[in-house]
Amino acid sequence: MPVDAEKIDAEGLYTGPGLIDIHTHAADNKWLFEYPAETSRYMLSHGVTGVLPALYYNLTKEQYLAAADAILNAYRRGDFANFLGFYMEGPHLNPNFGCDREKNTWKGKIDRKDYAEIIEKVKEYTRVWCISPEREGIEQFVKDVCAATDNAVFAVAHSEATPQQVEKYIPYGLKIGTHHTNATGTIFKYSECRGVCVDEAVNYNR
């Protein structure tokens, strides 16, 4: 230990590393984007020292922007000390999967004019961008994210993409497979196994 290091008497308590939650929507029965200061304090009190608030595809464009502003304003005021960046669970995921999918307002054609303002708002703070590679038009969205920010990281989420569709986006920065037991693809090569697809691509390229 450095001679000038701060020493804290834990008074017999145990200490451990803080938890980092890379994908959560709520805490203490409150949405993070509606109560950023309160949920931050709650998570800190339970050992979550870092969190990526997840913004989900049941938000409209205006709600995405307002939610991002609410969290960023709290962070800038010092009221969201454990904020590490956003986990963008959308907007363009497979509309057949996911919680609250009946309220998905992003089922239509993927159009730059609909998402450009969202990318601009969160580009400096987003750590993970979730995509469904099988969606028509998703490649332009991915290219626009990459053009707006350095070192973009993408995750396959709520997707029934084939391994080939998944692998297409690895050069763009696709590094994570998530939610892949919620939607497991369309390949049924072996009758005794359900098609896995996303899992296959993740395991082959891990």
Image (cartoon, rainbow, N blue to C red):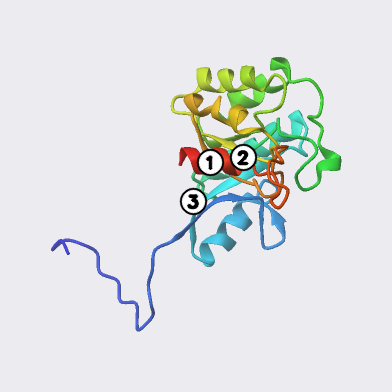
Residue type at the position of mark 1: Val
Residue 202, which numbered label? Answer: 1
Instruction: Return the disc, 3 or 1, that comes first in the chain's sequence.
Output: 3
Q: Which residue is denoted by mark 3 in the rendering? A: 81
**Image point 66% across, 22% down: which residue?**
138
Q: State left or right for residue 41 relative to residue 180.
A: left
* Residues at marks 2 and 1 touching, judged by CB atoms closer than 8 Å: yes
The answer to whether residue 147 is seen in the rendering is yes
Frontmost of labels 2 and 3 is: 2
Q: CA distance from mark 3 to mark 1?
A: 33 Å
Q: Is residue 85 visible?
A: no
Residue 152 lies left or right of residue 95; in this view the side is: left
Residue that numbered label 2 is attached to: 198
Vertical comparison of 50 with 164: above or below: below
How many neighbours does mark 2 have within 10 angstroms: few (below 14), some (14-19), or many (20 or more)? many
| Tag in front: 3 or 1 | 1
Q: Amino acid at mark 2?
A: Val
Residue 4, compared with residue 166, is above or below; it is below
Residue 184 % position (x, y) = 69, 44
Q: Tell me which residue sits at (68%, 31%) in the image.
A: 65
Residue 99 falls left or right of residue 39: right
